Amino acid sequence: MSWWKRLVFRGRMEAQLDKELRFHIDQHVADLVARGHLPDDAQRLARLALGGPEQVKEDCRDARGTRWLEDLWRDTRYALRTLRQRPAFAAVALLTLALGTGAATVMFTVIHGVLLKPLPYHDPGRLLLLQERTEQATQWGNLWGFTYPNYVDVKRAVRSLAMAVWRYDGGAVSKPGAAEYVDGAQVSSELFSVLGVKIPQGRAFLPDDDRPGAAPVAIISHGLWQRRFAANPEAIGAQIVFDGQTYTVVGIAPAGLRISDLEFDVFVPLGLETSPVMQNREAHAGFRVWARHWPGRVRNWPWSGANSPRSIQNPMPAARSLQILCAPKWAMWARRYGCCWARSRWCS
């Protein structure tokens, strides 16, 4: 008989056990009476020979292999009866268990998402986040995103990294269909290649798209493609109006693509931006610089030598003290959640 049948038919097996035990005792008593013992003496000797009935039953229950489940069930029933008799204690115990379970779940979720789960990009171990460190600290510290002129200088001087820059640029998509506010991003043409993200339909941005005066083009998310174009492949080459500007759709981003934990619906080239902030070395306007170091060309970081970020000379006085913080991209994500990563170091 399988273990689950022993558990389900436990009552029937207990009755059968009592019946067999009585049968063996009666048989032994009959044998002793036949040998000339008095009935009372034969009953006592039979019980001594076979052992206590409850001890024999316990041995038989252990042999079934379901004893631990039966004990668990009895303990659970006893605990429930105790909690019902003491409701205040039961409430405190349940609240403590709920808080402990919730705290453990939250901590595991954060640790798994920040430290254990790899970034959803190709070869994430080579991704880096670059930030500026300035001499003058403010109430927000001295660690900033890049200014665009400094990014251009660093990109021109450093040959060991493939670099890309982006910043948030939300706005309303008013064509086709009804107006809808969406999350957007201004990105350099290298962003998708740095992340190792392939555009499944259409193409990524070209260097010629990422310059002032170029034809305005856009890459839209898989979700926006489904909502606005009903997943029609002819969306490539169609036009959308984003934040009052008309763009030609040249690509569809892969489903579920997230940049810095955000799922953008519209990507446009950053080089189309002509506002004064693009020339201001003191304006930290939310530019985020990501990089990927080339395999075989950089074995350890921080780097040193003529191509190191710290060796870059800038003509502007405000940028002469520029230092670059190079850290694994996922370590920078950890900082968003208040975590500390000891391997984040200053490039030297």
Image: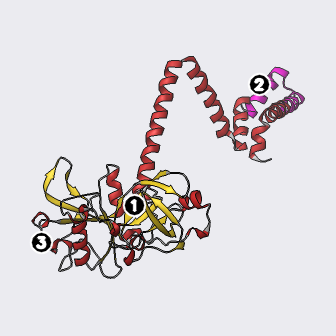
Q: Is residue 156 above or below residue 238?
A: below
Q: Is residue 251 magenta?
A: no
Let me know if residue 52 appears in the view: no
Q: Residue furthest left?
A: 317
Q: Are marks 1 and 3 in contact (CB under 8 Å)?
A: no
* Residue type indicated by callout 2: Arg
**Disc 1 crowd, CA 10 A, few/some/many (<14, 14-19, 20+):** many
- SS class, disc 2: helix
**Disc 3 crowd, CA 10 A, few/some/many (<14, 14-19, 20+):** few
Q: Position of residue 141 (x, y in %)?
A: 19, 51
How far apart are the alpha carbons under marks 1 and 3? 30 Å
Residue that mark 3 sits on: 315
Q: Is residue 66 above or below residue 143?
A: above
Q: Is residue 37 magenta?
A: yes
Q: Residue furthest right?
A: 34
* Residue type indicated by callout 3: Pro
* Marking on residue 283: none
Q: Give the magenta-colored segment's residue range.
A: 26-50
| Rendered residue at 21%/49% (across/down) | 140
* Marking on residue 44: 2
Q: Is residue 329 above or below residue 210?
A: above
Q: Quadrant of residue 131?
A: bottom left
Q: Are marks 3 and 2 in contact (CB under 8 Å)?
A: no
